[in-house]
Amino acid sequence: MPKPIVRRLSEPYIAGPDVVDACRAVKLLNERGKVATIDVLGEESSNSGQARDLACEYEDVFETIQRQRLDSTVSVKLTGLGLKLGYEVCRENLEIVVRRAAESANFVTIDMEDSSTTDETLRLYRQLREAEHDNVGIVLQASLRRTIDDVATVTDLKPNVRLCKGIYIEPEVIAFRDFDAVRASFVQSLDALFEAGCYVGIATHDKWLVDAARRLVRERALADDEYEFQMLLGVRPDLGDELVRAGHRLRIYVPFGRQWYEYSLRRLQENPKIAGYVAADTLGRLRPRRRAQAA
């Protein structure tokens, strides 16, 4: 797909190529009553130097967040930090990021990638928590059949968990394919995490799931600081604004980096349905402009 087309499609969803672009987006979000998590694009590093460079780039992110007094955490992908190059390579780079975050009183969420990385991701998370790194959270994907069992294996850590549907196309033997089954898994996992006293980032743009989550929050009489909702930059801002107006905490995932093209293509390849969603959203943004020009 030509870069100009991908760039046009990705503009609302990626802050830009540099940290200043991400922080500009976060500042606007903060002004609108939302918090953020910044992700430096850089998946599947091809060598150890590239993985270490990505870890060091997060140091600049923490410094900028602190200097500008932004309300933002960060998110990291372990393949970018070298997971495919070796477990120890990734662990060392992840510890660099987590320690630097602690120095800035910040927090790191470890993104969950495709199912080939799930076991090692959970292992690294536990290893960090058992080493008394408390400023780190994990992501679980409701589309995986194993997730409800994974909830049970991590609740002893009282984790900070981002619960999402999951974007990756996985074999049916390990993942739910039915839309309603994924929703049911999401609600079941969310309820189990709440029952265990975990802090959950409810990451979804599905209005049905948002409403189901709000019901669970009401039934458990959870305080505003015991959970949050999470969404992607540029996706369903109307729903996000509705949550903020209702008094819920909302965190926006803000990706930036020079690998925006690779990131965008990978997302389209991993889940072709996104292409249709993005195209419809893009047309929705263009139509008002065309109507205005016609008027």
Image: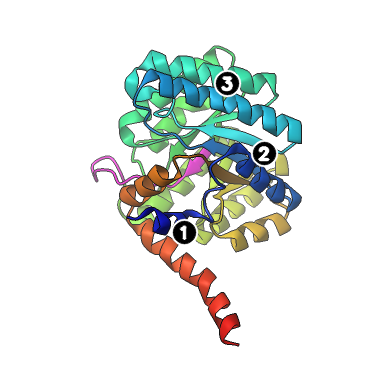
Give the CA separation, mark 1 to mark 3. 34 Å
Residue in front for this viewpoint, 242 or 36: 36
Question: Is the residue 102 above or below the residue 255 in the image?
Answer: above
**Is the N terminus in the top left, top right, bottom left or bottom right quadrant?**
bottom left
Q: Position of residue 171 (x, y in %)?
A: 24, 43
Q: Residue placed at 71% from the left, 44% from the top?
A: 224
Q: In this rendering, would 189 be left or right of 34?
A: left
Q: Could you say which disc has been placed on residue 98 in the image?
A: 3
Q: Is residue 251 above or below residue 238?
A: above
Distance of label 1 from label 2 (alpha carbons): 37 Å
Residue corresponding to mark 1 = 8
What span is colored magenta in the figure?
162-175
**Mark toward the viewer: 1 or 2:** 1
Secondary element under disc 2, as helix, strand or loop, is helix
The quarter of the picture where residue 120 lies is top left
According to the picture, the residue beneath numbered tag 2 turns out to be 226
Assess whether residue 156 is covered by the magenta stretch: no
